[in-house]
Amino acid sequence: MSTNSHSFDTAAAHAYTPVAPAERSPSERIIDVVTSWPGITTAHGSRGELSFRLGRREIGHLHGDAAAHFGFPRHVWVALYKQGRIEPHPIFVDLVGPAARRIEAESDIEAVIDLLRLNYERLTTLAGGRSIVAPTSSPFFGG
């Protein structure tokens, strides 16, 4: 009879402890929501950003999990700035239009999605029923 100096807990060996899937990053969560909107495509930029596009127009872009940048008309930018929903773009600090939102907390994820949705709805309203999505059958648009 052999003696084993190691104890073996049979109950523990058969117990199942579910492992939660790794939580999705802030940018992955934003991408999941925004790319579910009709007509939205993404493109990688030269500075590492991921832009969200509706047709040829950008509604905003992400810099990883750190920040989102947007462009708004003057009157919209002023209102959003007064509400504390955006801050000046870090490169274009003196311009009204380019905007930024840092992603530091859970609430910032929803705020970024809301700001992207604002631009999305603004552009779809401006289109007034016209399609602003590039045709897919044209050789000029990769179709």
Image (cartoon, rainbow, N blue to C red):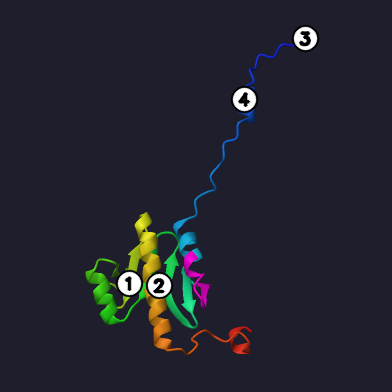
Q: Residue furthest top?
A: 1
Tell me, yes or no, if residue 68 can be seen here: no
Q: What amino acid is found at the position of numbered circle 4 in the picture?
A: Ala
For disc 2, the marked residue is 117
What residue is at 59 percent from the left and 85 percent from the top? Answer: 141
Relative image position of residue 85 (x, y in whole percent): 29, 67
Over which residues does the magenta segment extend?
33-44
Q: CA distance from mark 4 to mark 2?
A: 51 Å
For disc 4, the marked residue is 11
Q: Earlier in the sequence, mark 3 or mark 2?
A: 3
Nearer to us of marks 4 and 1 is 4
Instruction: Please tell me whether residue 27 is drawn above or below residue 58 in the rendered image.
Output: above
Q: Earlier in the sequence, mark 4 or mark 2?
A: 4
Nearer to us of marks 4 and 2 is 4
For disc 3, the marked residue is 1
For disc 1, the marked residue is 99
Q: CA distance from mark 3 to mark 1?
A: 76 Å
Nearer to us of marks 3 and 1 is 3
Kindly check if marks 3 and 2 are in contact, taking CB atoms under 8 A apart as contact.
Answer: no
Nearer to us of marks 3 and 4 is 4
Left/right of residue 34 with respect to residue 11 in the rendered view? left
Q: At numbered mark 3, what does the secondary structure look like: helix, strand or loop? A: loop
